[in-house]
Each structure stands twice: as structure tokens, then as C-alpha cells.
Image (cartoon, helix red, strand yellow):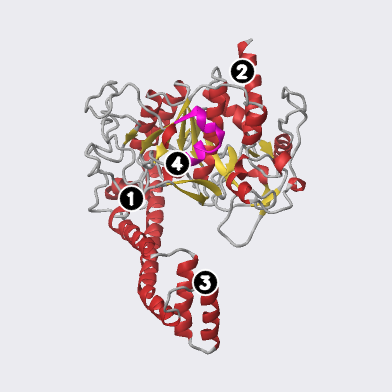
Amino acid sequence: MKSKDYKYLFIILCCCVIVACASSKAILKKPQIITVSFAKKQPLTKEEKQNWHFKDIYTDSIPGISLDKAYQELLKNKQGNTIIVAVVDTELDIDHEDLKKQIWVNKDEIPNNHIDDDDNGYIDDINGWNFIANNHGESTKYLHFSSVRIIKKFDSLFKNKSMSDFKTKKDVDNYKIYKRAKKQYNFLVKQAIQDIDYIKFLEDNYSPAHKLVYKYFPNKDYTISQLDSLYKLKDSKGDKKEAALIYYVADFMKYNLSKEWMQKYRRNADAKIDKILNLDTYNEREIIGDNPNDLNDSIYGGNNVIGIVKESYHSTQVTGVLLSGMAKYNLKIMPVCISTNGDELDKDIAIAIHYAVNNGAKVINMSFGKEFSLNQKWVSDAFKYAENNGVLIVSSAGNESTNLATDGNNHYPNDEYNNKEVVNNFIKVAASSYKVNENLAAVFTNYGKDDIDIFAPGVEIYTTQPNDKYIFNRGTSLAAPIVSKIAALIFSYYPNLTAPEVKQIIVESGVSYNIMVNKPSTNKEKELVPFISLSKSGKIVNAYNALLLAEEVSKKKKK
């Protein structure tokens, strides 16, 4: 490591951590760097498991975002403005008991009169818009992977050619992208075939395994523990075939592999081959009916934002994180649907951003990502449009355990175009855990010193599921809305701040952790690295600190 890098690390370690004084008015105090000595010694309680991401590292010994503390000490007697957050994602269960009161309503549109009352081009867009449906309420279940789109565009030009066959920089660059797409495509096809083999194995053994177990438990009242004992007995007697079948039933129970689950897995496995990875016959825009290569063809889709929410639940989980905690009362959620099985189209991303901005969103949450971007300029221009209109964009980092700072490891959307950062209203968020030790960085999260702005809780997050259900889940998809929540709070209480200022406040006010952590990886072998080396800021986002700093910046602007 060069000397200037050591200097940089030292600066990050000494970055401001804002804490409250004992007086009634909070002020900035001397920085305090978190070490493993802050770790909670006891296991999390049931309440802490559901809300650990709201806790405070100083008072609770849990590396949350200090949201509870922020409400108790900073916002208790304050009245904020209502902020609209656009969730650009899958279709959304807007009727969920914990979400329905906070869904955005377009007051300029008269419901179901089949007239574009607000003259924005989208008829009866009462609660948002669905760009992967049509005006008959039909939803697209499957989109292509982005590698398929790259191959379909360039195959006639580059197939059976080598790089030496091309002279211009544009052709050489496109050829490299094409070759990467081919490699990724072949990997995905192999993976899809493995999925089909796996589900066939489960299907072939499900009935015989249960039939055998029912012979020993005719009342079907067995437990996993009883099955384990029966398995050991059969295995010890050398009856390997029966032992294996009993073992399978125990696994079916342990991992909730029901017939319904297997049917859904089978549909998705088959669809990957027949539709998502189909280079020849599948038209991903057939239901939608637009021209995916024409950005000016922008009026398409439908007003039904619920769609096939039982099969496409991602946005419901993301929105649950956004609205969890007391912050929900100052938030309205605008669902803008562009995601389903497969990868999002750049056209849909760009037009969704324009729709969100034009209809009053102050924050846009985008918890999705892909390896290739066929029309990146469309998305970059949309980011600029959001920046020019004071809107902040928050994006998830991805879940591939990949260093995005390494050449060739791309995750779109991002704020770069032609290797230059083009906007200052974009935050990319990686995922952290509740463990103040070597496992602080989530094992699955993407990371990178040049690409990731900040970390946020993204492991074992309790959130909403369609049909009034709830679930623990993980992913950078759930870390991003935590940052969006904080951004919305800042805009709510400090409306004179700009999107770039809010970004800077969020990044600078995070908490630094002076801890060696396992570098996110799919390998069993672990490599310890400084937590601060995994992102630009080296920090975990903190609502309490961000609100303190926002107040200070806001006051200075008013003088």
C-alpha cells in the first residue's frame, strides 16, 4: 500500500462521528471510532431481531442506524413535510395492511374515468404506473437477461469473429462486451440446466419418500427429530435406499419444500430456458406492445401496480423496509413497476425515473441491478434529469460478493458514463450485518472503494410480504431503502437542502468501524480486510448523525 493510501485510511478513520450531548440540544462532539469492544455480548432478543437495524451502536451495542434514538431525541416534537419516495421495482401489494395507508395518490387524476385528467400521458395513474404491463391489466412475467439483449444486438456482427477483425475503438469495445455477454450467457444456461435437474430430482423423490415415511407414521404426525432418528437407524442397518428417502423428507420439512414451492420452482426453471434465456423466439415486449429501442415511445404500460404480486413480491419487501418504524408517517410510496423475472430494460429505467420526478418524488429507490447496460446513456441522462429537479437516487450494490472496483466487474445502474462520474445525486449502498466482528460486512454484498458510497443494514431484516404476511430476508435490496428512508427524513425536516447536499450529509455522517472483516466472498476461505476499505466512505449509514448534520447545514444556508 502506498503512503498516500495509508493517509487516506487514517483520514477516513478519523472522520466525524456525531454523538449527542447530555443537554436538551444536540451538538457535534469529538469523533469516536467503533471497535469490536462495542459488540453486544448477549444474543439478540426477539424484539431486537425484528428491529435491530433501528438500534444504536453506542447505547444498544447493535450496529443499526440509530433511528429510534433520532425520533426520541431529535424529532419528537417536530413536524416534517410529507415526502414522496418512488419505489422503482416489481409490482407492489398496495393493499397490504402495513402499507396501504402510505401509498401515494395522484390527486390530479379522477379514478377509473379512462381519461388522462392530469395530462401527463398516463390514463388513470392513481397510485403510480406499471411499465411492464398493458392497459388490459396483463403483466409481463419474464424479461430477458441483459446478456441475451447484448447477444441479440451484436451476434450478426461479431459471431465467429476475433478482435483483430475490427479496427475502430467502438467496434473493439462492443466486441469485448459481446464476448463477456456470451460468457455470462453460457454460465446462466448451465445454471438453468442445473436448476431443472435439481427440481426433477426433488419431484422424482417427493412421493416415494413420503409414501415410505407414512408406512412408519400412518397418522402423518412425525417431526424432524423423529425422522433423524429413523434415518440413523436405517443407515446403521445398511438400508441406504430407505435411509436416503427418509433424509429427503426431513429436508422437505426443514426447508419448507412443499409441492406448491416445487411447482413454482419448476415454472421458473423452465421459463429461464424457454423465455429469459431464449435467443430466438421469445418476445419480451409482446404483452407491453412498445418499441424497446425507441425512447420517445414513452406512453405504454398500465395503471394496475399490483399485477402478479403473489409471484413478484420484491417491491413489497423493499417498501416494508422503507415504511417500517415511525418514519412512515412522513412518507408516501409511489410504485413504479419495471422489474420482474429477468433484467430491467434501460428504457424502462429511464422513463420510470422521468415519471417519478414529474409526479413529485423526492427520493427514488432502485433495488435492482444487472451486469450489462445496452443503453446506458438513456439512464445517465435520466439521472441528470433527476439531479436538475432536486431528486436523490438510491441504488442497491448487488449480491454477488464482487469487488466492483476490479476492472470488468460492472453493476448497473451506476452514476458513471464513459468511465466518468456524471451526477452527484446517486448513492450506491452495500449491506452490513448486526455483528460487530469479522462478519460485519454481509457475505453476499458487492463492495468497492470506487463504486460503493456507504453500507446499511441488510441482513435478517424483518419486512412485509404480500397478503398481509411478514418475513425475515436479506440483501442489498433491503439496505438501499434504509438509506432512502434517511434521505426522506432529511428532506422532510430540512426542505431547503439539495439532493447533492443530502447525499453528502448521509455519506459524511455515517459511523466508522475500525474493524477487520471478512471480505465478502463465495469462497470458504476467508480474507480479513479493514471494513473501511470496502466503500468510499468506510462507514455505515446513521439516521441520528445525518439529522444532526442536516440541521447544521440547513442553518448555515439560512444565514
Q: Which badge, 2 or 4, is on the more N-terminal residue?
A: 4
Q: Which badge, 3 or 1, is on the more N-terminal residue?
A: 1
Q: Which badge, 1 or 4, is on the more N-terminal residue?
A: 1
Residue 323 drawn in magenta: yes
Q: Residue furthest front?
A: 219
Residue 155 drawn in magenta: no
Which residue carries the number 3 mark? 224
Which residue carries the number 2 mark? 554
- Give the alpha-carbon distance from disc 2 to disc 1, as whole Å: 47 Å
Q: Amino acid at mark 2?
A: Ser
The part of the image, by quadrant, that contains residue 553 is top right
Q: Which badge, 2 or 3, is on the more N-terminal residue?
A: 3
Which residue carries the number 1 mark? 148
Q: Nearer the viewer, residue 143 or 208?
A: 208
Q: Which badge, 2 or 1, is on the more N-terminal residue?
A: 1
The residue at 49%/72% (across/down) is 250
The residue at 27%/49% (across/down) is 156
- For the residues bearing labels 3 and 1, Cβ distance under 8 angstroms: no
Which of the two marks, 2 or 1, is nearer to us in this view?
2
In the rendering, at what x and y percent does residue 122 appear?
28, 28
Which residue carries the number 4 mark? 412
In the rendering, at what x and y percent does residue 176 appear?
41, 47
Mark 3: which secondary structure?
helix
Q: Amino acid at mark 1?
A: Val
- For the residues bearing labels 2 and 1, Cβ distance under 8 angstroms: no
- Give the alpha-carbon distance from disc 2 to disc 4, as whole Å: 33 Å
Which residues, given as a range, are shown in magenta?
319-332
Left or right position of 171 against 498: left
